[in-house]
Image (cartoon, rainbow, N blue to C red):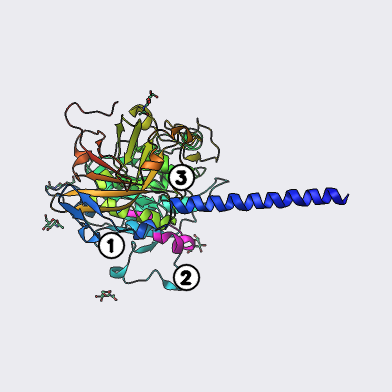
Amino acid sequence: MTALIKIKLFFSNKLSIFLILVIFFVYLILFIRFPFYIPAAVQPVKISYGPEIVLKSDKNIWVGNDTADSQPNNKTSIRHIVFGIGASSDMWHRRKSYIELWWRPDVMRGFVWLDKPLAGGKDHQNDSLLTHPPIKISSNTSHFNYAHSGGHRSAIRISRILSEMVNLGLPDVRWYVMGDDDTFFVTENLVRALAKLDPDQFYYVGSSSESHDQNIRLFSYNMAYGGGGFAISHALAKAVAKMQDGCIQRYPKLYGSDDRIHACMAELGVPLTKHAGFHQCDVVGSLFGLLTSHPVTPLVSLHHLDVVSPIFPGLNRVQALGRLALPTRLDSAALAQQSICYDTARNWTVSVSWGYAVQVFRALKPAREMEIPVRSFKNWYKNYDPKGYSFNTRPLSEDRCEAPAVYYLTKAVLDEKLRRTASEYLPHPIGNLRCDTWKKQDDPAVMVQRVEVHKTPDPNFWSKSPRRNCCRIIESPDKRGTLGIDVGPCTEDEFAGF
Ligand SMILES: *[C@@H]1O[C@H](CO)[C@@H](O)[C@H](O)[C@H]1NC(C)=O
Ligand SMILES: *[C@@H]1O[C@H](CO)[C@@H](O)[C@H](O)[C@H]1NC(C)=O
Ligand SMILES: *[C@@H]1O[C@H](CO)[C@@H](O)[C@H](O)[C@H]1NC(C)=O
Ligand SMILES: *[C@@H]1O[C@H](CO)[C@@H](O)[C@H](O)[C@H]1NC(C)=O
Ligand SMILES: *[C@@H]1O[C@H](CO)[C@@H](O)[C@H](O)[C@H]1NC(C)=O
């Protein structure tokens, strides 16, 4: 009996010594790999830019004219847009920080529409000091019928924001743009999308859901989803304002505000002008796949900011979206635009999502595969059913050799003389996983610790026919592990092939 206990003790002691050794080695390895972990945000940018120019600090950050604001020749600009944000006073305090990320009080017009005044009269602020759109209280809609058992009658109020804004009679409005309090707009790209259309004609612009089920069963592929935001030309808005109240009464059983708008559009016979840059984001988890294989169209909006995880690791949701501000300011047209290139000597595929992330794959993968979003997310019903999406997706590999080494944007600067940007991308704080079968090959997780992308901003990128930029590897990983990449228009006969 005692002998048995002794043996047991002996083994459990050995086991604990073994465990301690294992833990010690793991720490040792981690320490060797990351001796002093410096958070990305405070790392200095030292970008050697060709032989003579070195960008050293934020001083070189260019606050340029890439705002699509100053359009000559009567072109549509941000001043011609009025935003209508559907919000509730209970959630306002928390959601307002999302709006403050993109709202520019000096150039934008619009209102946040609440159900009731904020506690303490906080909505009576001095408008010129606001960091968000001025607040308006929606008019009483209790006399409308609402008969959907699963929804909330605030849908009627939010649907009527459009008519209420038309009835304000604001001057020089070309577009009314609706969004939720958790919608993030890249307003420069919104202007780019709308400036192509004649606001004196009837236009209903937006996009459907990422969830095939939502589109086919509950709502419609013909509906612009409200959270992704949608735009209505002023001519159409005037027509809607005249009939919307009657129209709303004809559809008491509908669920939301956006399907009520869609019902009125169907009565008016105006189809959805689909723009794939509006993102309802009806997914759960990480938007990585959507942002690294974005359609070849400007990124206009993101939604469900409380549902999806922060778009950059190690930051909270608001900080993470805030990190997009810098690339947006430098080259909004290029934001999250993909380019694909190869290091055929090393068997690497490089996929750049400008201003967001760079991936290096341990294989030569064709462009037709790389342009398909990887399922970094679950679908809206929180499962992995690959048939649940309204677009093509590809699986996320669990094999660490198939998974790419990933680098996220940390900094972006502009060289004013060359008018070229340099953006820096670093690995996730815990690093990229090595691949055992690539021990004798050039494993990007080992060789590349930093990616630097050079690009000339092109505010007119979207006035041309849509085409992805090309990328080229201009610098093999040096001693510090920097991979240099150039992104720009494809030259004659250039394409992403290997
Ligand atoms: C922006 O454009 C205006 C007018 O075209 C010009 O006067 C101004 O200097 C420009 N600003 C910058 C930062 O380039
Ligand atoms: C400018 O464009 C708007 C919207 O398309 C149009 O209504 C207006 O007539 C135009 N003004 C001039 C002077 O062309
Ligand atoms: C609002 O603030 C501005 C700037 O501080 C000031 O000039 C203006 O008089 C204020 N207006 C009111 C109504 O308080
Ligand atoms: C809205 O109107 C109804 C009657 O039409 C009234 O009972 C209710 O108090 C009103 N609500 C508000 C917030 O004024
Ligand atoms: C690249 O991949 C091919 C095919 O898988 C293989 O034959 C070749 O040896 C690899 N080259 C390098 C440098 O790893």
Q: Residue at x 62, y 53 (%)?
A: 20
Disc 3 element? loop
Q: Position of residue 134 (x, y in %)?
A: 34, 64
Q: Which residue is mark 2?
A: 119
* 217 on left or right of 114: right
Question: Within 10 angstroms of label 3, few (less than 14), some, or many (20 or more) residues?
Answer: some
Image coordinates of residue 413 in percent, x first then y, are 24, 53
267 left or right of 463 in image: right
Q: Which SS class for mark 1?
A: loop
Q: Is residue 95 magenta?
A: yes
- Percent from the top left, x then y, of residue 142? 49, 56
In the rendered image, is residue 74 in sight?
yes
Tag 1 or tag 2, which sits nearer the N-term? Answer: 1
Verify CB contact (< 8 Å) between mark 3 and mark 1. Answer: no
Residue extending farthest to the right is 1
> Magenta region: which residues?
83-97
Would you place residue 213 above or below residue 199 in this image?
above
- Dividing the image into four quarters, tell me where ligand 1 lies: bottom left
Image quadrant of residue 123?
bottom left
Is 59 or 243 nearer to us in this picture?
Answer: 59
- Residue pointed to by mark 3: 286
The residue identified by callout 1 is: 105
Q: CA distance from mark 2 to mark 1?
A: 23 Å
Q: In this rendering, does residue 271 appear at all?
A: no
Q: Identify the amino acid type marked 2.
A: Ala
**Mark toward the start of the polypeptide (2 vs 3):** 2
| The C terminus - image quarter | top left
